[in-house]
Amino acid sequence: MTAIGWVQIILYCAIIVALTPLLGGYMTRVFNGERTFLAPVLRPVEVLLYRAGGVDEKSEQGWLAYTVAMLLFHVGGFVILYALLRLQGALPFNPAGMTGVPPDLSFNTAISFLTNTNWQNYGGESTLSYLVQMLGLTHQNFLSAATGIVLAVALIRGFARASAKTVGNFWVDITRCTLYVLLPICVVYTLFLVWQGMPQTLGSYIDATTLEGAKQTIAVGPVASQVAIKMLGTNGGGFFNANAAHPFENPTALSNFVQMLSIFALGAALTNVFGRMVGNPRQGWAILAAMGVLFIAGVAVCYWAEANGTHILSSLGLSGGNMEGKEVRFGIVASALFAVITTAASCGAVNAMHDSFTALGGMIPLINMELGEIVVGGVGAGLYGMLLFVIVTVFVAGLMVGRTPEYVGKKIEAREVKMAMLAILILPLMMLGWTAVAVVYPPAVASMANAGPHGFSEVLYAYTSMTANNGSAFAGLTGNTLFYNLSGAVAMFIGRFWMIVPAMAIAGALAAKKSVPPSLGTFPTTGGLFVGLLVGVILIVGGLTFFPALALGPIVEHLSMLAGSVF
Amino acid sequence: METSKVRKRMPVSTLVDPKIVLPAIGQSFVKLDPRTLVKNPVMFVLEVVTVLTTVLLLRDIVQGGQSLAFELQIVVWLWFTVLFANFAEAVAEGRGKAQADTLRQTRTQTRAKRLLSADNPERFETVAADDLRSGDLVVCEAGDVIPGDGDIIEGVASVNEAAITGESAPVIRESGGDRSAVTGGTTVISDRIVVRITSSPGTSFLDRMIKLVEGAERQKTPNEIALTILLVGLTLIFVFATATIPSYALYAGGSISVVVLVALFVTLIPTTIGALLSAIGIAGMDRLVRFNVLAMSGRAVEAAGDVDTLLLDKTGTITFGNRLATEIIPVPGVTEREAAEAALLASDADETAEGRSIIALAQDKYNVRREAAPAGAKFIEFSAMTRLSGVDAGTRKLRKGAIDSVLKFVREQAGHDVAEPAAFRAAVDKIARSGGTPLGLAENGRILGVIHLKDVVKPDVKDRFAALRRMGIKTVMITGDNPVTAASIASEAGVDDFIAEATPEDKLRYIRNEQSNGRLIAMCGDGTNDAPALAQADVGVAMQTGTQAAREAGNMVDLDSDPTKLIEVVEIGKQLLMTRGSLTTFSIANDVAKYFAIIPAMFAAFYPQLGVLNIMGLSSPQSAILSAIIFNALIIIALIPLALKGVKYRPIGAAALLRQNLLVYGVGGIVLPFIGIKAIDVIVTALHLA
């Protein structure tokens, strides 16, 4: 580890903290339906869209209507994307002449982009046309991100409102989120990426002759526009197979740093939106602080593990830590930091191969996802995932002060606990359950690139990533098989929606409750004690659930490595 | 407060009392019935897996397994775990049962004299108390046990209510007014009354009391339900975590026996809190009962812990029942001593509390000796007409009373208009402004001075209200006084708010208003006009001396009729919630150590590298697993006293309380099992059990 490495990490955190209230304030205005400085340009478009869709801006929905609207919206999105994938051979903007995508892969991919996972069992440049990339994927990148954000906002409204029947209007929220938040940032961001050297073209792939005289096809395309939303919306699905390790998808150190910032920007800002909407910004900061503690701890371990490398590498005369699978352009700190960020959030873009990390270094991204990606997390999804843990924490801790637990003025009772547990339960079921099937099902075992605990980690990582809607891969595993395509689609679907529906039920239940004014007998949820408690509950509940699996994967691999055997 | 010292308690039975422990051991086996156990999901799951391992053990015995002794021990300890949980519940129930038996004795054998017609109280038939219906009229004479709950419609009697309250001094019950309610099971000591029965068989106060202390009809309270859901959720998570292990092991080229897997599962699921949960609830109710407060539901006890606002009647709760003299202010030209002597003499035969307080004041503050009243002195009693009292001793006519009346008396005596001294008027105004009552003092045609009567706030209520404030509870004083008087007493007592000139409607309105702001309200009351407010309040404590209507409306009844007890009721509610939370935290925190004991042992056969995780240095895989499961069972027994006694509540503010409990039950919960499991491992190894 180097001082300059830590400077980069600290600088990163500082900028995120600085951005949080700025973006948070702006987003609060957007979701409170207030006028923003972009209104002169965007308001006419917004009004036009409502008129076209027959949406009454003023009417609001209860939690169930809101959720049903969201689900219907996704059914439509799925049909369009699946059709595009299957029919791409017959559709325009296909200079490379890609043929239709097979059914199981199309199914997996459609679910993957619908759920903000962006798990890719294909290589973008070798499988998809520009039309599919732009109309299908980029479009879903926007909408799945917007969906996550508006659901979080609906849950926040549940906490903020008292004796209310409604939690907002899904159609209005998703329109405003896309128009006022995602689009403007992406326009500026895309231009920045183009300036940094990222291609943005509808022209065909370029054939070049190398110095040795060999002919090489260089894939290009509308990269910058997809990368902007892929990062900002924590989607993570790369234009190219190599994702953010590809020079065209991440040209410079600056683009790398800004991409990392854009992963956390909206997720962190939502904590601030939460604080503002419940009337006490410190509530938001407390949540961000808990996220920050887990983040810094993860970065420290991962950076330490990668910077130290292994004694096997050193004995081969290699110094300077573990550089296997990393871009020389980025080096160890930027790779380790990127890996922790992308898995802490549900982004899943990668600028290094996580498979090549040391056992402990690779365990951190795994843990990040196993905890449910609540460390900042996917846009929206991170906050509502975190709030579920907050409910569990407040419930246990609240009892310890001798009162029915309360959080930001809302009593936490049986219904909230039930829904929170239902949502939290699904993570181990999908992650551990599918892994248990895959490691003994011969066709699935055949997909593993490595034997022993490392192979185990590959499979565990894959299902963890899909369930948590991350989308990053440990690599090494051949995912494009019927079994992984279908089981993965189930994991992604359940991981997303089994979480959302209970969270929305909580939103509805909370909105209907009275708000209890805080007193000295209410336990404060803004201080260090609460932050520590929240972190403790997350680590104990998450840690205890996954400890056996981690012991059999990364931990035993690390211990074996110390004993000199690798897999 | 003096009332808290003299409180009578029902006998406290301890954990080592054989009368409770022996039946509880028997009950532990009876409660193994899955139909009973299914109400406690965690324990039910435990029983299921225990039966499963028992079957597997039997199979291995028949087929000849390799590690039978180890498996046998695991199975035995699993059964112990279930039994210990049942034992905890049985002990908690047993304590109530002992009380219920005493109560039940009074109920049986009661005969009732039922009137044949309402207009003739002499003609009655003798029937069994169980045959009485609501609306029947019964007559009770000295020595009779009142056969059921009811209202006196005729007569007055002294009644011994010791069967219900434990208090042996008889109380007066009479028809009409707020003292008309009688309770079945109590005994008439003197006189004769006619009672209209208001309860049907099996629903009387005594019946409800018996059921409550027995915990027979105990329903889960809202927080208990929520906690059960949390525990079920955690159990399911650990089902997933352990059920997937065999597949992982198979991939790694090993296998894991079901018994070991069950051992891991059982140690991980929250058995500690699962086992103690119902005992905690029963013990909470029991604590109230021993405090002579009957809660009609567990929900009410829990609500007491959540209370944000306490509505307290001024008189008797915040102040002493009567106004007391605190100062005698003479007019110019009269010495303090002179005025004090006159005041003492005027009050010499005054047996009211006010009168006695004037005597006490004159003696203590002004050092006037009390001498025998002059011969031939004629005492004038207070009457509503004259609003004066005093004495005529020879030529001296001393009077004290309402200011107007005293002035009128002076003018009559002097035979002409007497100017009211400016200092007198000033003193009267000052007393009135401060919320006190001025009492004029005069001799013949001369005004002597004014006596300051005031509501005296009980000595330590201010501290108690300060403690309540630290608990986050607002206190509101209810009084019939005018706003000026009320404000003065409120500030002296340190209450947060007051309702002056309060009518029953005002109380109701105040409660509704607070509730609409999300607050929970507790109040106590005894009169029929309190009933609507008692019913509306989240915690309504009715006084046992109160009317039947009030007792029906409240969700708690205080058998001692002591309104200050509301404060303890709140503490008991908080204690109940805290005990649950603390033991849940402890239970979950325990899991960390258990993982470190079992995981390395479990995978030792095929991943010996994981031995590094055996940080406790447990001697062998089998002893590690056995030690963890033994610890898991014994901790239940060890925590039964805490579950019954409850975690101590201190009004130090939520943050400080949380920090303290987190340190003890959270951090302690992580550390303790490391020590405990290691210690058990040493013993297990020394005894060659594994």
Image: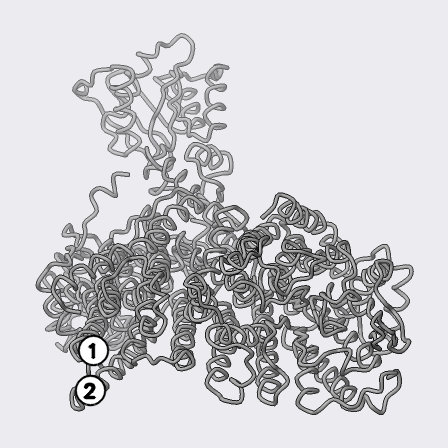
* Relative to B430, A169 lies left or right: right
Q: Are marks 1 and 2 on the same chain?
A: yes
Tell me if I can see residue A282 in this picture.
yes
Of residue B554 and residue A196, the one placed in the foreground of this image is A196
Question: Where is residue B686 drawn, in percent x and y?
Answer: 13, 61
Work out which quarter of the rendered image holds the C terminus of chain B and state it: bottom left
Task: Point out which mark residue B71 bears.
Answer: 1
Name the amino acid type tagged 2: Asp
Question: Where is residue B649 drawn, in percent x and y?
Answer: 33, 48
Quadrant of the rendered image containing residue B531 = bottom left
- Residue A19 vertical position relative to residue A153 in the rendered view, above or below: above
Q: Residue at x 14, y 57 (%)?
A: B13
Q: Are marks 1 and 2 in contact (CB under 8 Å)?
A: yes
* Relative to A382, A538 lies left or right: left
Give the distance between the C-alpha atoms of the residues marked 1 and 2, in whole angstroms.
Answer: 9 Å
Which residue is labeled 2 in the image? B60
Q: Residue at x 51, y 76 (%)?
A: A455
Name the amino acid type tagged 1: Glu
Tell me if I can see residue B517 in this picture.
no
Q: Earlier in the sequence, mark 1 or mark 2?
A: 2
- Residue A75 vertical position relative to residue A267 in the rendered view, above or below: below
